Image (cartoon, grey):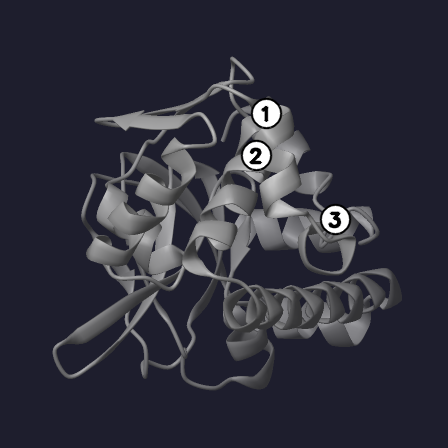
């Protein structure tokens, strides 16, 4: 592992308060692997064997029921998944697959549980991380239940403009059908949402989304810190 990658993992909220020896032990027993796009890393219903850290690339968390499938979240560096299943030694409730070339650190679940019992700093960080995850879930439920498709898309655009190289242009690094699923829509509903936002200065061509009038989009989206604010 590159020193800068190890340092970035060390500064994740989950690991930064752990004792030096606790962190070193987890890194020493971890497996650093590269995966091509489209590889399923874990399957829902399987027993949790590892805590995963996305070092590079993009990972989709998804779930399926019969022929139906939905995107639950996207995990970018240096995000982790799935902590709750690891701590409880239970089955994964989600599956995960790479959307691009990715590098993952896989920490054996038993070593994470061992660190939880032995290191008070790590234990506190775990509680905080689980609380953060719960709040994120509640915010996403509110986003899905209280907003129209166009409003969800508008707020997603506002949040992601902050991470784009150019404030007014967002370049998707995944398919639009993943975006529709992430926002709780069908591809057809996403198309209608884009059509609604077209009158507000939003245009879409291929993987590029252009926001022509940020202030108008804000007025339409009405971002709510109890839904869209940071944890």
Crowdedness near tag 3: few (<14), some (14–19) or many (≥20) residues, C-alpha within 10 Å: few
Q: Nearer the viewer, residue 175 or 51?
A: 175
Q: Give the number of the disc on residue 214.
A: 1
Is residue 136 found left or right of 186 in the rendered image? right
Residue pointed to by mark 2: 217
Residue behind mark 3: 230
Residue placed farthest to the front in the image? 199
Residue at the image position 58 percent from the left and 47 percent from the top: 27
Relative placement, left or right, of 63 versus 90 is: left
Q: Nearer the viewer, residue 89 or 37?
A: 37
Q: Secondary structure at mark 1?
A: helix
Regarding residue 74, the answer to whether it shows in the image is: yes
User: Pointers 1 and 2 in contact (CB under 8 A)?
Assistant: yes
- Circles 2 and 3, Cβ within 8 Å, touching? The answer is no
Q: CA distance from mark 1 to mark 2?
A: 5 Å
Q: SS class of the residue under badge 2? A: helix
């Amino acid at each position: 592992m590159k020193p800068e990658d190890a340092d970035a993992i060390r500064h994740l909220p989950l690991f930064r308060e752990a004792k030096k020896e606790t962190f070193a032990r987890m890194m020493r027993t971890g497996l650093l692997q590269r995966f091509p796009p489209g590889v399923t890393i874990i399957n829902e219903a399987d027993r949790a064997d590892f805590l995963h850290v996305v070092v590079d690339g993009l990972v989709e968390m998804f779930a399926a029921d019969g022929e139906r499938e939905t995107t639950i979240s996207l995990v970018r560096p240096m995000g982790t998944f799935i902590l709750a299943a690891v701590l409880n030694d239970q089955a994964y409730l989600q599956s995960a697959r790479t959307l691009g070339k990715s590098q993952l650190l896989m920490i054996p679940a038993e070593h994470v549980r061992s660190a939880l019992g032995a290191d008070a700093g790590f234990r506190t960080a775990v509680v905080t991380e689980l609380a953060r995850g719960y709040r994120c879930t509640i915010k996403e439920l509110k986003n899905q239940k209280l907003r129209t498709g166009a409003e969800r898309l508008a707020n997603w655009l506002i949040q992601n403009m902050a991470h784009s190289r150019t404030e007014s242009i967002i370049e998707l690094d995944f398919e639009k059908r993943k975006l529709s699923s992430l926002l709780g829509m069908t591809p057809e509903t996403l198309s209608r949402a884009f059509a609604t936002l077209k009158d507000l200065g939003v245009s879409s061509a291929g993987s590029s989304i252009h926001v022509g009038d940020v202030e108008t989009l804000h007025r339409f989206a009405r971002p709510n810190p109890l839904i869209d604010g940071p944890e």
